Image (spheres, helix red, strand yellow):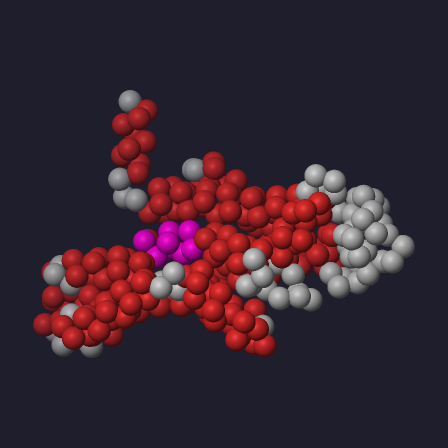
Amino acid sequence: MVFRRFRRNPSALVGLTVIVLLFLLAFGGPFLTHWSYSDIDYSALRDVPSAEHWFGTNPIGQDVFAQTVRGLQKSLLIGLLVALFSTAMAAAVGTAAGYFGGWPDRIAMFFVDLLLVFPAVLVVAVVSPALRSYGWIAFVVILAVLAWMITARVIRSMTLSLKQQEFVRAARFAGVHPVRIIVRHILPNVASFLIIDATITVGTAVMFETVLSYFGFGVQPPDVSLGTLIAAGTGSAITYPWMFFFAAGMLVFFVLSINLIGDGLRDALDPTSDRGRRRRKR
């Protein structure tokens, strides 16, 4: 039923198609060219797009297509991993706090409130220089740790409501283990919110990574991401537009497509969405 609703949403299908194409480009693009993102062509400095360099070259002769594909690949991986880790943490903390209540709830919510006090950008700016030797995985961990608190609060509220339902109370009276109740009864009933939140988190994480890389706190050279490419090409956006607009275009397409998929999933998982469509038709 959810798949049928999603399939009937043209904008969601367009977003899904674009995301699939971007993934194919990110992970299949390196096989389409003999240039690596780190290779330098000293005979082609700031060359316009051509048959040899499809997206042109940058000031030191690196192939912009190879760098854009590499940056897209890195940004997609960061966005997906941040969404996966942060959603898992939010689900675990939110359901446990809401179901058990008492001191576990107070401690978890105190920790959540404490993390919400610190500005995310400031935390990354302070911590990331000390973790640069660990590569982009450490950057993913930092973003994931800073992205789950609000979702955990919402999941806690939903769990407080769900644990008063008859099917959860019956499982408790039957002596079912609390972890089993959370996995089999609580999580399936909050899964729709978690799925929608995860899609939004992917786009947010990519945007956040882009901003931080733009200011030098994200992915570090010689590796590249969409943020580092946009930062490097900003000064040449008018005179040498291919250094800026290809990476910026990939970012725009990705974030818009994720938003379209999130809207489509929200409508597909909403049990009243079909009724709303019938009313509008009438």
- Magenta part of the protein: which range? 193-201
State the residue in front, 174 or 255: 255
- Left or right of 34? Residue 134 is left
| Residue 156 horizontal/vertical position (percent) | 23, 62
Residue at screen point 61% across, 43% down = 249
| Residue 15 horizontal/vertical position (percent) | 51, 43
Asked if the stretch drawn in magenta spans residue 280, the answer is: no
Up/down of 123 relative to 17, above or below = below
Q: Quadrant of residue 160?
A: bottom left
Q: Main secondary structure of the magenta part?
A: helix
Residue at screen point 35% across, 42% down = 267
- Left or right of 281? Residue 264 is right
Asked if the stretch drawn in magenta spans residue 195, the answer is: yes
Q: Is residue 147 visible?
A: no
Q: How many marks?
A: 0
| Residue 147 horizontal/vertical position (percent) | 39, 61
Q: Quadrant of the C terminus?
A: top left
State the residue in front, 241 or 200: 241
Residue at screen point 35% across, 68% down = 89
- Left or right of 39? Residue 19 is left
Give the farthest residue toward the right. 43
State the residue in front, 268 or 208: 208
Up/down of 171 relative to 35, above or below = below
Give the farthest residue toward the top. 282
Q: Is residue 282 visible?
A: yes
State the residue in front, 194 or 5: 194
| Residue 6 horizontal/vertical position (percent) | 41, 43
Residue at screen point 43% across, 37% down = 8
